[in-house]
Amino acid sequence: MERMTYTFPATKRMNRFVHVGVVGSGDLEILIEPTDQSHTEVTIRTGVTGYKNTWKSVVQRFFTQHDVAAKVKINDFGATPGVVKLRLEQALEVIANDSYIKS
Amino acid sequence: MIRTLKASFVESSGRERTHGIVDENTYKELLGPWDNLESPHLETQGIVPQSDDGVIVAKGTIDEQPAVVISIEGNYQGGGIGEVSGAKIAGGLEMALKDCEAGVKTIPVLVFDTGGVRLQEANYGLLSIAEICAAIVALKRYVPVIAVIPGKIGAFGGMSITAGLCSAIIMTREGRLGLNGPEVIEYEAGIREFDSKDRPLIWGTIGGEQRTGSGFADLLIEDDTEAIKETITSIIKDDSNLVHRTEQVERYEAFLHLIDPKHRLSSDKVRLLWDQSEHAMVESKSTILEGDQTIGRGKRWFDLLRGDALEIGDVPSVRVADSMIGEKKVRLIAVVPDAQNRFPRARKGEVGLQEGWSIAKHVQEVIKADKNSKKRAIVAIVDVPSQAYGYHEELLGIHQACAAAVDAYASARLNGHPVISFIPGNAISGAFLSHGMQANRLIALRDDGVNVHVMSKQAAARITQRSLEELEEATKKVSAMAYDIESFKQLGALFSLVDVVEADTPCEKDRAVIYQEIERAIEDVWMDRSSDLSVRLTSSFAQSGRAASILVREKLNEQWN
């Protein structure tokens, strides 16, 4: 198992907890928690080791494109980068549907 | 309005399934992902935990009736029951029981999708499943406990026993219900016994349609969320038609008598025989109990503890005697090897079909006989290598036989009989769940030949995809994975661990020690006002050994109302 943490600057606040996905084969679980900080902290735990660089690129690109100040926890069970991106987008969609991104 | 589009229940996640059943405006999830109560035992073994440990507990109403829906997420670790997930299920049921005792009828609904115990947390799963069983039996006195087995994984291992205890079982064609999974049977008994690649064989043995046709499930319904909710609602509204399978000892006994295990039975034949069994009678004949000299520890201790008391059992593999320990009346029950067992897969002392039903019969007998008098103690002598692995065993519902034994022991306990387990040998997996785990107090011998676990090391290594060495390494970190009785003691479930000189060839001196321990345990039960298994969590060892099990219950209690 591998554990990584990345931090990105962020400004937009959210006011609710979001949870998507499952730690199942080829999938992952994402928990997004509101924070008062002006950055996003992403903690990743994955059962597949040796893909640090890939993880970094995927989350860096995502949180550069999407401005959300939050604590993000990712529990991964071998999801491909495409699935990771889809799950992150799904989480933001849940937030958008409930319209709780406040700028 | 005509509904044209069905929402699949089978394809839904564990959480979506609870949303499909609970009235939406009343829905409240307890110990959800935000509580982040994940398994404390997985990260040390290199496995990524999940924020809800794979169990969703949702409280609310179902058609305005208070209810708790507990759903297992099959995609996370095969729906395996670990310490946290197991405590969430048991704790949720215990809270519903509390409600019922206080006059609030809270209906428990269990949505199964599980392979049984999570092997990485082995004995935690075993203890949790015993507690789930205990809660279901207690709840059934107030409300129907409803099981839904939608499919993908199904209900296997110890969790199939918990399903067998439920008042009603709803399945779809895609659901499967069996004690031992096809791969496990093939591994333990060989490909000629069960070919795990043979899909039609699997569905014809343990699939939803077969289970409903042969009396092991109540309702077969379409994979449609709304239909499932409607079915649950109709059971809640009228549960008068439900027949509790675990109490139908006579019918299942008759059913087994109609079967000749020498010939491989077909699925169709079983359905036919099940229908016939409704009117069949078992001729009572005296059984010759002697003839088998391959006795093990269980038999030796049974004979020693019984003294001069007459045997009253009716199958050679389940020995029963009414005896006295000091001034106390006790019924002794032991499962022992029988080389001539009608069912070949149960010849080495395993708990099989006949054994489960026979235990149930002899325990129920005691409950009935002592209804208006002092409740005698029941002592289960535990030396069981495993449950029986076989094709006929699954086809004829070994999980139901085990559930009947569990139900009988748990009911005896709830009715005020002190139930004591004495463990001089192996106490393993489904066999231990059925024979021993429902006891008020557990007494074990401190001896290398006394082992408690859920699966042989070889099979456990294979299924968790580790080498034997890696498995041994993991057992050092998680005492619940270890096999020895000293490690089991750390989990707090034992009443006492006894040093006896000779566990294999006990003599009268050893008997005196064990008599004393059993008496002490019985008196302890008499002093205790609770008849549940809570003592396993209040013991001093449990405070550290089962810290997460205790925490989960505390949090559930906080969030319940």
Image (cartoon, coloured by chain):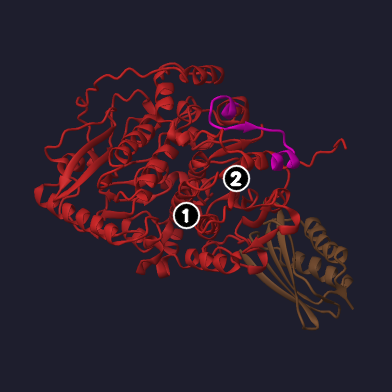
* Residue occupying the point 27% across, 39% down: B334
Q: Quadrant of the N terminus of chain B?
A: top right
* Residue occupying the point 73% across, 56% down: A79
Mark 1 sits on what residue?
B128
Residue A68 bears which disc, if any? none
- Is residue B506 or residue A55 the one in the foreground? B506
Q: Is residue B274 above or below residue B106?
A: above
Q: Magenta stretch? A: B210-230
Chain at numbered mark 2? B
Side of B536 relative to A17 (left or right): left
Mark 1 surroundings: few (<14), some (14-19) or many (≥20) residues within 10 A = many
- Label 2 sits on a secondary structure element that is loop
- Is residue B117 or residue A6 the one in the foreground? B117
Which color was chain B given? red
Q: Residue B80 placed where, x, y %?
A: 55, 50
Q: What count of labels does the image hold?
A: 2
Q: Is residue B370 above or below residue A40?
A: above
C-alpha gap between disc 1 and disc 2:
15 Å
- Label 1 sits on a secondary structure element that is helix
Mark 2 sits on what residue?
B112
Q: Residue B94 placed where, x, y %?
A: 50, 57
Q: Is residue A73 above or below residue B367?
A: below
| Amino acid residing under circle 1 | Ser
The chain drawn in brown is A
* Residue B350 inside the magenta-drawn segment: no
Chain at numbered mark 1? B
Q: Splitting the image into 4 quarters, where does residue B381 fall?
A: top left
**In terms of sequence position, does the residue under pointer 1 or pointer 2 come before the other?**
2
Mark 2 surroundings: few (<14), some (14-19) or many (≥20) residues within 10 A = many
Q: Residue B99 placed where, x, y %?
A: 54, 58
| Amino acid residing under circle 2 | Phe
Work out whether residue B560 can be spotted.
yes
